[in-house]
Amino acid sequence: MRHHPVQAATSMVGAMAIIGLIDNYIALIARDISLWQFQFLRGTIAVPTLLVLAAAGVFIVRPKRLWAVLVRNGLIAVGMLFYFGALAFMPIAQALAGLFVAPIFVLLISIFVFGERVGLLRITAVIAGFIGVLIVLQPEQGSFSLISLMPMMGGLFYAMGSVATQRLCPEEATPAMLLGLFSLQATFGATVLVALHVINPVAAPGTDGFLLRQWTTPQSFTWLLIVVQAFGSLMGVGLLIRAYQSAEPSFAAVFEY
C-alpha cells in the first residue's frame, strides 16, 4: 500500500474546499429539477468533457481493472444518492453532519475488516474532527425520522467506496475513476427518470419534489448552477480520489474534517 501523507493531505484539503462550496447549490437546484435529472445532466456535462480531454491526449480514461472501478464507483454513487437526496429535506449543516460519520466508518472498516493497525493518534484525530464538525455546523436537533438516516447511510457507502479506492484502485488513473463515476451516476439518473415517467407519481412543488419530480425544463439560473456543479465536481472529486489513492484510508479520512 502506498502512503504519501503530504500528497494525501493537500489533495483532501483542496477537495473539501471545492466540494464544501458547490454542494450548497443542491438546495437551489432541488427547487427546479429532481435528483435524478440533476445526476443525469451533470453526467452529460462531465463525461463528454473527460472524453474530449482524453482524445486530446491530456490524460488516459481507460481503466486497468474495470470490475474494481465499477465496484468502487458503485459504492460512491449510492452514497452520494443518499447524501444529495437528504439535502432536499434538511439544512446542509445537518446533512453534512450525517455524512461526516464517513471517516469513523473508514476507521472501523480499516480495523475490523482489513486488520489495519491504527494508532491512538488517528483515532483521536477522527473523534476530534467529528466533534469539531458538530460544533461548527451546529445541526438542528429535531424528531427522529427515516429521512434523518439518509446522510448517515450516505456516509457508510461513501466510506466503503473510500476504502475501495486504495484497496482496489490504487494504480488507476484519476480521470478513469471520474469517467466511471459520472457515467454511473448519469445512468442511475436516466433509469429512474424513465421509471418515474412510467409510474407518473405526483411530485410536490419546490424542494419537496426532489425525489419524485419527472423531467422538467430547468430555468437559466438552474442550468448555470448545474454547469458549475459539474466542473467543480470534476476538480473536487478528482482531488478526493487522488487523496485516497495516495495514503492509507484511515489517514486520508482525517483530513476531510
Image (cartoon, rainbow, N blue to C red):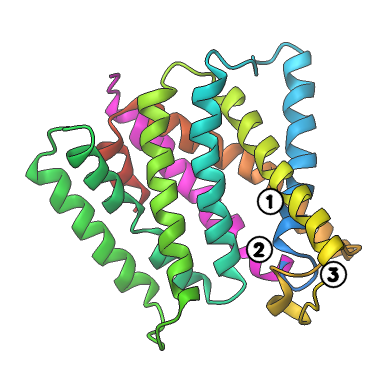
Query: Label 2, on which residue?
Result: 25
- Residue 145, percent from left and from top: 45, 81
Q: Amino acid at mark 3?
A: Asn
Outermost residue to the front: 199
- Residue 166, percent from left and from top: 37, 27
* Residue 15 part of the magenta-drawn span: yes
Mark 3 or 1: the one toward you: 3
Quarter occupied by the N terminus: top left
Outermost residue to the bottom: 143
Q: Are marks 3 and 1 in contact (CB under 8 Å)?
A: no
User: Residue at (32%, 70%) from the top-left corner?
Assistant: 134
- Residue 30, percent from left and from top: 71, 69
Label 3 vs 1, first from the N-terminus:
3
Secondary structure under tag 2 reads: helix
Structural distance between the alpha carbons of marks 3 and 1 = 28 Å
Location of residue 2 with respect to 125 vertically, above or below: above
Q: Which mark is residue 229?
A: 1
Badge 2 crowding class, 10 Å Cα cut-off, few under 14, some 14 to 19, many 20 or more, is some
Badge 1 crowding class, 10 Å Cα cut-off, few under 14, some 14 to 19, many 20 or more, is many
Decide which of 159, 250 is in the foreground and name it: 159
User: Residue at (73%, 37%) from the top-left corner?
Assistant: 46
* Residue 121 part of the magenta-drawn span: no
Q: Amino acid at mark 2?
A: Tyr
